[in-house]
Image (cartoon, rainbow, N blue to C red):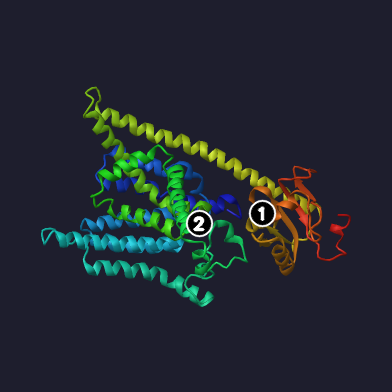
Amino acid sequence: LGPTAVASALPFALAGATAAPLAWAIARDAGLERRAALGAGVLTAIPGLSLVFMVQPDNFSLYQPLVAGSLWMAARGLRGDARSFVVAGLLGGLATLSRNDGLLVLVALGVTFLWDRARAWRSRGRRPARIPVVTAVASAVLFLAVLAPWWLRQLTVFGQLSPSTASGKVLFIRDIGEWNSISTPATLDYLLGMGLGPLLQTRVEGLIAAVTIYTVLVAVGILIPLMLVGAWHHRRDASFGPYLAYAGILFAFSALVSAVHVPGGTFIHSAVALAPHGYVLAMAGVRVAVGWIAARRRTWQAPQATRVFTTAAVGFTIVAAVAGAVAVQAAWGAKRDRMQAVATALDAQAAPMTDRLMSIDASGYRYHTGRGGVVLVNDPLPTIEAVARAYGIRWLILERDDGVPAVAPLLDGDLPPWVGRPVWSEPPGATEVAAGLYPVCFDPADERCSGA
């Protein structure tokens, strides 16, 4: 289809489309009636406010069906299907290729195996284990076999399995603002140096952020009570055991390890994998809640009321998904328009395509302007200047709503000697601007900054 947005999004849309029939199959396999299974499938196809992410050229639509499929196969393994548990390892390995959080799936599979063994031990022979040891080993081996080529590549190119965590930026920063800093130590001593109280506060805030993100983007608020009712009703059901284990592990990991990254958008990439089973539990929760109320109200007919409330829950989620998609697309459209305006301004200045840009979104401006560059580091202005000199930066793009504190005075007109007046700004000609394109001049003879 050529280098178009549709061509980039289409494979991910097709991959993500497998999640809806997968949710239907999970629901039917768990014993839910057809209407509830259909509702879960529709909700997975139109997953609330997370809908807009599912066709992005990102790992959302890859990670979701692979994790959901792995947990479904693990549940079938708990019910005696040994081959399904082996397939769970395969799907978990593929999920890890799309996102490192897939390693938590392996942990969930291990917990599932141990729970099965513990249950058999407590029954004193009355209930034999459903997952043989050889099956668990085969599942783990298949999981690792899928990842082995990638890990060998990492060792060959970087000399380590996880270069993204080598610098400490993933694990040891105190807040998300330090993610783009090159002067922050990002060591364990630095993290612990903030004190026990502030450290615990960041962990609690990470957990709250994770719960909030899932509640808003996946459950659109109204489905959370239904999911909780369904989860409590099926808490001992093997059909949901691996899923509940994975959900607990994911939220715990987000709170204890990646807490500062959760508000920055990291968690939603993982949270979408909880959607298919979550929607199945929501549909189950409708039936349980209606049945409880109908038993106390003689005027209620449980079957009819279940249909009404199931339709209402699905309908409300679809409306919220459409409204949310419109709002998000408008925000993304405004961002795109700004980047295209910068591209037009650069062309008007006859800026060569080899000119390098410094901005908070280097890849986005690379896409829209065709000019490469580096990220605006979240450090003091002298450090920003040093980075600009080191990389031969020719243009500085500043955005008040997406910048760093050190460059706020530039947007107010207080420019250092190496930055010229903006050649484009938003709004045009204002002293205090929301965004601007500034020439960077380290050569006194650079005419772009003459008359500044």
Residue depicted at 62% across the width and 66% down the height: 183
Looking at this view, is 86 or 227 the one in front? 227
Residue depicted at 44% across the width and 72% down the height: 149
Looking at the image, residue 206 lies above or below residue 284: below
Image quadrant where one finds the C terminus: bottom right
Q: Earlier in the sequence, mark 1 or mark 2?
A: 2
Tell me residue 117's x, y (percent).
20, 63
The disc label shown at residue 260, or none: 2
Tell me residue 42's x, y (percent).
39, 40
Left or right of 425 on screen, residue 31? left
User: Label 2 is placed on what type of residue?
Assistant: Val
Tell me residue 186's x, y (percent).
55, 67
The disc label shown at residue 405, or none: 1
Looking at this view, is 411 or 304 the one in front? 411
Tell me residue 320's x, y (percent).
47, 36
Left or right of 345 on screen, residue 228? left
Looking at this view, is 83 or 404 the one in front? 404
